[in-house]
Amino acid sequence: MMTRRFLQPLFTGIIMLGLFSCATIPKGATAVSPFDKERYLGQWYEIARLDFKYERNLNNTTATYSLYDDGTIKVDNRGYNTKKEAWSQAIGKAKFIGDEQVAQLKVSFFGPFYSGYNVIALDEDYRYALVAGKSTKYLWILSREPEIPESVKNDYLKIAEEIGYRTSDLLWVEHDQSK
């Protein structure tokens, strides 16, 4: 009897922790809907990001999205490592978490380990995107061109700040080389 009273709250706690740790979008953020996967495919320039270890020292960064035969999205990230003075590339896979009309995906560059990729703002022409990771530690501003209009930049910064992002920590990417 004593064991049962102890184990039930323990198992409930483990289940609750599992549910909350699987969150793929920051609290307060909403993925774009309706979303057109086909229109999102192609090359995007990274305009700004919250820096993290896998992109540290990279400039001239781009992400190119295409479809694999199974319908998942191929993610081809490239950038110039300013410390190593060499181009870097990472290829991954993205899958929708649910309905493909909702821009809430998970992406993996390392086997079975996935992280959130959520388009939380997108212009109607699919030229500019604001992408949130699974928490407020990950944020990207993307554009089809190496620059973004000031008005779009300001709108996206305001959206990010309202969710809780520290936009003052954004790293603004240079696009001064091509491969």
Image (tube, helix red, strand yellow):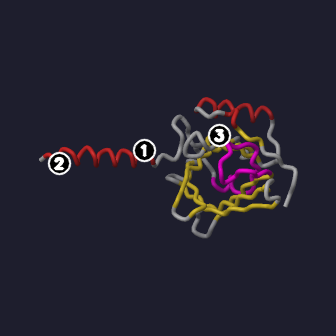
Distance from Cα at disc 3 to Cα at disc 2 = 48 Å
Give the residue number, with chain letter if any, for mark 3: 121
> Crowding near pointer 2: few (<14 within 10 Å), some, many (20+)?
few
From the viewer's perspective, is 54 left or right of 11? right
Which residue extends farthest left?
Answer: 1
Q: Nearer the viewer, mark 3 or mark 2?
A: 2
In the image, what residue occupies the spot 62% across and 44% down?
A: 138
Q: Residue at x 55, y 65 (%)?
A: 111
Residue labelled with disc 1: 20
Residue 113 in the image: state x and y as whole percent: 52, 59
Query: Is 151 within the magenta?
Result: no
Measure the alpha-carbon separation of dots 3 and 1.
24 Å
Cβ atoms under marks 3 and 1 closer than 8 Å: no
Q: Which mark is residue 111?
A: none
Q: Decide: is 140 above or below 89.
A: above
Question: In the rendered structure, which segment of residues is drawn in magenta?
Answer: 37-59
Would you name the residue on which mark 2 appears?
Answer: 4
Q: Residue at x 69, y 58 (%)?
A: 65
Q: Position of residue 60 (x, y in %)?
A: 80, 52
SS type, badge 2: helix
Residue 85 placement (x, y as % from top left): 82, 58
The amino acid sitting under disc 2 is Arg
Q: Residue at x 62, y 45 (%)?
A: 119
Mark before the other along the chain sequence, 3 or 2 = 2
